Image: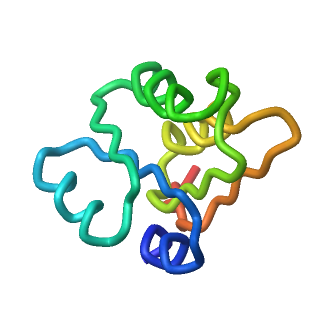
Amino acid sequence: MMLHVAALAGCETIAIVKHDGQVEAAKQLGAAHVVQASSIRKAIRETRAFTPKDRGVDIAIEAVGVPDAWEEAVEMVRKAARSTFSAVAPWERV
């Protein structure tokens, strides 16, 4: 949903996916670019490659709700950019 809304708003979107089946779905939802990566480092590197001088994206929206994705989103943005966390992580009982 976040990808589709951003694309409709005119943003040049980059979707990060893990599985083959997600590539086509991301394109149908408006992704200008799709990065399919199994590791956080690869996803960050390939996403930054779409930006001028590999500086990073202006806005990263994390919608998965897992700690690895939070870390990934923060490392993809340029200096003074925004990371938005919209997914709810499962609560663990201590």
Q: Is residue 36 left or right of residue 1?
A: left
> Compared to 50, does 45 lie above or below?
above
Q: Which residue occupies the foreground of this view, 76 or 9?
A: 9
Q: Which residue occupies the foreground of this view, 4 or 92?
A: 4
Using the rendered view, name the quadrant where residue 18 is placed: top left
Q: Residue at x 37, y 68 (%)?
A: 30
**Image quadrant for the N terminus?**
bottom left
Using the rendered view, name the quadrant where residue 10 is placed: bottom right
Q: Is residue 90 left or right of residue 22?
A: right
> Compared to 34, does 65 lie above or below?
below
Q: Where's residue 12, x and y in %?
A: 53, 57
Q: Residue at x 49, y 57 (%)?
A: 13
Q: Where's residue 33, x and y in %?
A: 38, 48
Using the rendered view, name the quadrant where residue 19 is placed: top left
Q: Residue at x 32, y 72 (%)?
A: 29
> Compared to 12, does 10 lie above or below?
below
Q: Where's residue 46, x and y in %?
A: 44, 26
> Compared to 37, does 90 lie above or below?
below
Q: Residue at x 51, y 26 (%)?
A: 49
How many labels sit on residues? 0
Name, please, the residue furthest toward the left.
21
Q: Is residue 27 left or right of residue 42?
A: left
Q: Where's residue 34, x and y in %?
A: 33, 46
Please name the colour scheme applied to the rendered image.
rainbow
